[in-house]
Amino acid sequence: MTLADQNNNRFRILVCIDGSEESYQGLRYASRLGSGLDADITMVYVRPVDQGLNSGGLQVRVARQNMMDWDLDLPGIRYLKKGRDLLIELGHMEEDWIERTTHVESRGDPLGDNMIEYSNEEGKQIRLWLKVAETVEGGIMERWEKGKHDLIILGVTSDHRSKLQRVFGIAPIALKVATNAESSVLVGRAIEEGKGHLICTDGSEDSLNMIRKDAHLASRCNCPISLISVAPTEQQRGDADQAIEKSKALLDEMNIPVEKSIVRVGDPVKEIIKEGEHHSVVVVSGTRSSGLQKYFMSGIAFSILENSKTSVLIVR
């Protein structure tokens, strides 16, 4: 196998760091998902262009040498450093890994983009990016596009709709990324490990494809899987029962056990959100469409993402 083939077979996770406890909970979850030798983690902190750093002096020269040696309180540095130290504490990386730094001029900003990469003898990599962009979501998407990550993880607070609704447009940052990214996106809200994935299924081919992908993802962290299907009316309960049976049969073929199967009647969004409180992650399918947005989620998936108190994974 060539080096290019090995790189293509790697599982890449992009974790968005903003200094909040939720973002570090997302990093802890990424550490579990990326525990194998085939997985790499990239942490990114996005800051607005310039942010008052037009000195072009000592700070910039130090940044180009090794951003992790900074003792200055520059934007994002302490957050990324805390993330690196957390991965060391978790045993995900060692302090003696090989270190490489990169500086890239960006948008005329004096600090530009800065990256430090750690790697071990097995080829496992941890990257820390201090990135400049016009908007936070724009910087995240740019980093995703260049790294071709398989999964994006963003942590949001439980009152995310008020705190993320700032100067970034109509939709909060997490919703914009989840809507437009071509990869899977995990919007983490106080992720509690060990409570498993709750996969929402309607028995469709898109739903079954989503189950296949999440089953592989859940296996990376030894997360138990439960299934839920919601019928809007009692007359449609049979359809929900069939959806569960088809989904269980698929997982049986993959030799993956189902911890719990749930059929409910009622409003799908309300029922899924209610059941989701007993699980670490609610898993829904992202769907492709033409139109103004390259990708968008179904109304049900979007409503679950926007209103759930539980972490939500959009699978693509």
Image (tube, rainbow, N blue to C red):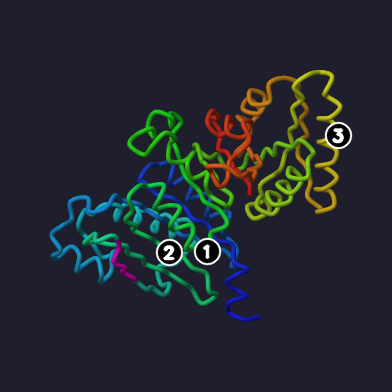
Residue labelled with disc 2: 127
Q: Is residue 139 left or right of residue 75?
A: right
Q: Residue at x 85, y 45 (%)?
A: 249
Report helix, strand or loop for mark 2.
strand
Please, what is the dominant secondary structure of the magenta stretch? strand
Disc assigned to residue 242:
3
Alpha carbons under labels 3 and 1: distance apart: 38 Å
Quadrant of the drawing holding the N terminus: bottom right
Q: Amino acid at mark 2?
A: Arg
**Residue at image x 22%, y 50%?**
51
Circle number at residue 40: 1
Question: Circle 3 — which element?
Answer: helix
Residue 111 belongs to magenta span: no
The alpha-carbon separation of the residues under discs 3 and 2 comes to 44 Å
On screen, residue 148 versus residue 23, left or right, reads right
Q: Nearer the viewer, mark 3 or mark 2?
A: 3
Q: Does the residue at mark 2 contact the one at mark 1 (Cβ under 8 Å)?
A: yes
Q: Compared to 95, does 255 lie above or below?
A: above
Q: How far apart are the two marked residues, 2 and 1, measured between alpha carbons?
A: 8 Å
Picture layout, residue 140 above or below residue 298: below
Q: Amino acid at mark 1?
A: Asp
How many residues crowd around disc 3 within 10 Å: few (fewer than 14), some, or many (20 or more)?
Answer: some
Label whose residue precedes the other's in the sequence (3 or 1): 1
